[in-house]
Image (cartoon, rainbow, N blue to C red):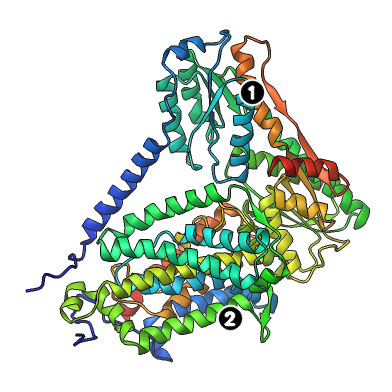
Amino acid sequence: MTRSPYSSPASRRQFLALSGGALAATALAAAGCSAPDDGASTADAADASEGSKTLTRIGLDYPFTQLPLYSTLVKLSTAAAKKHDVSLLTTSDAGNPDTQATNLTTWITQKMPAIVSFPMVFEATEAMAKRALDAGLIWVTYGGSLEHQSADIQFSFLEGGTLLGEAAAKWANEQLGGKGKVAFLTDGTIQLGRERTKGMIDAFTKNAPGVDVVAREQAIDPDTGLSKSRAVLAKHPDLNLILGVTDAAAYGGFKALQQTGRKATDAKTFVGGQDGAAPSLLAIKQGTFYRASAALAPKDIANAVVDVPLAVAAGKANPSVQVPITLVGRGDTATIDDLLAQNS
Amino acid sequence: MTTATTAPTNRLTPRPRALAAGGLNSVRRNPLLVVLALMVLVFQLTTGSFLDPGNLSGIAIDAATLAIVAVPLALLVISGYLDLSVGSTLAVGGLVAGWLAGQQHQPPLVAVLGALAVGAAVGAVNGILCCYLGLSAFIVTLGMLTAVRGLAQQLFPLPLSSFGSGFAWLGGSRIAGIDAPVVIAALVLVAGALFLALTPAGRHVFAIGVNREAAYLSGINIRRTPFALFVVTGVAAALAGAIKASVLDSVVAGTSGAGFELTVLTAVLLGGVALTGGSGSVFGVLLGVLFLGCLQNGLTLLSVPTFWQQMAQGTALVAGAALAYFGPRLTR
C-alpha cells in the first residue's frame, strides 16, 4: 500500500503555536546573527575607559539598515576607522527598537570599548547608556543627546527642514507672487521626522503665508509619496509645491506630478526633499522642477562616527560635533557631484 | 491516474467556489461588494472628486500591482499554502529589472524577463521546500522574506534610478487608452478566474486545499500544482516590482515592497479566501484589492490626519473582514 506524503491539516491551535514559535525563532536568530564579532579580549574594555589613549574597536549601532545611507555610512566609516587602525563593528537592528536594545545589551556585556548609537527611542536608551558608562565604556549618542553619554554627534534636523521650507517659500514668493498650493509629505513616527517636519512646515508657512496648505500626509518612501501625491493631485490638480520630509517621499511626489502631465521643467512647480538621496540630486542637476534638497554629507557623518569616540578616548575637551546640513539647488553642481561621489 | 477532480464537501468544510455567479448571488457571496459601493458613494459625496477619471486612474495603477500578486497568492492560499516572501521578491524583481535596464542598458524586454527569472527562482525555492520537502510554508516564506531582502540589500546597497524611456513604457504607457499596469492586472485576473473555473488543475487547487489526503487518494498530484503556484506567485511579485520600478523610475533595496506581503495577504483574506484553504474566488480578491485601494485614496482625499487615518483603515478592515465572514452565513 502506498503511504500518502501529505501531513494532516494543522489545527488552528497548532497554527498559532507554529506561528508563535516561528516568530520566537526568528527573533532569537536575529539576535544571534547580529551579535557582534568578539574580536578583542575583555581587557580592551578596561583600556578603553574615558581618558585612555588607545581604542581598537568602535561599535556603530545605526538601526535604519533599510536606508541607502546605511551602507554608505558603514563603508565610509570603516575606511575612516582603518586610517586610525581601529576596527568598526556594526549591529543589524533592521529598524526594530527591541532588536536594537538586544544588540546594545550584547555589546555592553561584551564590553565593546566605544559605542556610537542612534537610539530609536531616546528615553528607552537612557538606562542602556548609563550601564555602558558604568562599565567604563565610551558612549556616543548619534542624532541627539542623552543624559548619560560621553559625547554626541548632533544633526540639526530642525534646521534641515527650515532650510528647505525657507527656500521653497522664497521660490513661491518670487515665482508665484506668494500665492499657490503646497502639500507636505511628513513623518510623525520618529523624533528625526518630527523635527524635520516641524522645521519645514513652520519655515514655509511663516515665509509664504499666502500659499494654501492643502495636504499634510505621512510619507517617507517613494511608493507612499507617489500614491499620496496622486490623491492630492486629484483634488488639487493645480498644486504648485510638494515638500518632503525625505527625498525618497518627495521623489514619489515628483513622479506623481509628471504622471499627471506636468512637464519635468515646469516653471510653476517646486519639489524639494531632505537627505541628499542620489535620485533626487540627479533630478536637481538635470534642471527639473525637483529644485532642492537639504543634504547631509555622508563623509562628514562617517568621520564624526570615528573621530568623536577617538577624541573621547584621548580625553579631549568638548569632543561632540555638529554635522552640517547643506541646502543644494540647481546651481550647486560641484556640491551635487561631490555628494553623488560620496554616495557611489 | 486521476480519477476524481472534485473535493469532498460536508457541513464543516466550505464548498469550493469558482467565479461567482452574477446578480444577487454575487452580492450574497461577496458582501464586500456592498461595502465597496457604499464607500465609493460616501467618498464621492464628501470629496466631490473621488470618481474623477484622474483619481480613478491613480487608484487603478496602485491597485494593479496589488492585484497582479494577489491573484496567484490567492490560488496558493486556496490550495492550503502561503507565501510571505512576496514583498522582498517584489523588491528584488524591481532591482534586477532596473539594474538591467539602467546600468546594463539591456532592452526593456530583457530587463523584465531577468526580473521574472529571479522571481521564478525565489518561488521555486519556496515550492521545493514546502511542497516536496514538506516544510511549513509559514516558516519557509517568512525566512525567505528576510533572506531575499538581505540579499537584495547586499547586491544593491544604493538606490537605482534613471532606467530610460524604453523601460518607462511598462509603467507609464497606455494600451487602448488604459494604463499598461491596469491592462496587465486585468489579464492576470481573467487568467486566474478562468484557471479556477475551467481547468482541472483549478479544481485540484480547491481539492488540495479542502483535504489534502482525500485529494491524494483521488489521484491528484498534490505537490506539482502548489509548486507551480509558488513559482507563479514569485514571477508575479517580480513583475509587480518591475512595474513599480518603471512607474517610479527608481528602486531602493531596503524599502521597496516593505510590508507589501501583509497588504496583499489582507486583500486576499478580505476577498473571502479562507486562510485554511479550500475556499475563495478571484472576484472576491478583486473586491479586496479595490477595497484597500479606495480606502487609502479616499482617506487621503478627505485629508484625514495620519493617525486617524491608520485607525480608520484598521477599523474598516476589521469591519470588512467581519462582513465577509458573517455575511454569507446570515443570508444562507
In depth, the one of A15 and A85 nearer the eye is A85
In depth, the one of B97 and A27 nearer the eye is B97
The residue pinned by badge 2 equals B183
**Protein chain holding label 2:** B
Q: Amino acid at mark 1?
A: Lys
Q: Position of residue A258 (x, y in %)?
A: 75, 66
Mark 1 and mark 2: Cα distance apart in space = 55 Å
The residue pinned by badge 1 equals A83
Q: Quadrant of residue A105?
A: top left
Residue at position x 90%, y 52% in the image: A173
Q: Quadrant of residue B21?
A: bottom left
The quarter of the picture where the C terminus of chain B appears is: bottom left
Answer with left or right where residue A216 lies relative to residue B213: right
**Protein chain holding label 1:** A
Q: Position of residue A44 (x, y in %)?
A: 47, 14
Residue at position x 47%, y 84% in the image: B190
Q: Position of residue B220 (x, y in %)?
A: 23, 80
Q: Amino acid at mark 2?
A: Val
Q: Position of residue B158 (x, y in %)?
A: 62, 48
Answer with left or right where residue B308 lies relative to residue B79: right
Q: Secondary structure at mark 2?
A: helix
Q: Residue furthest left?
A: A1
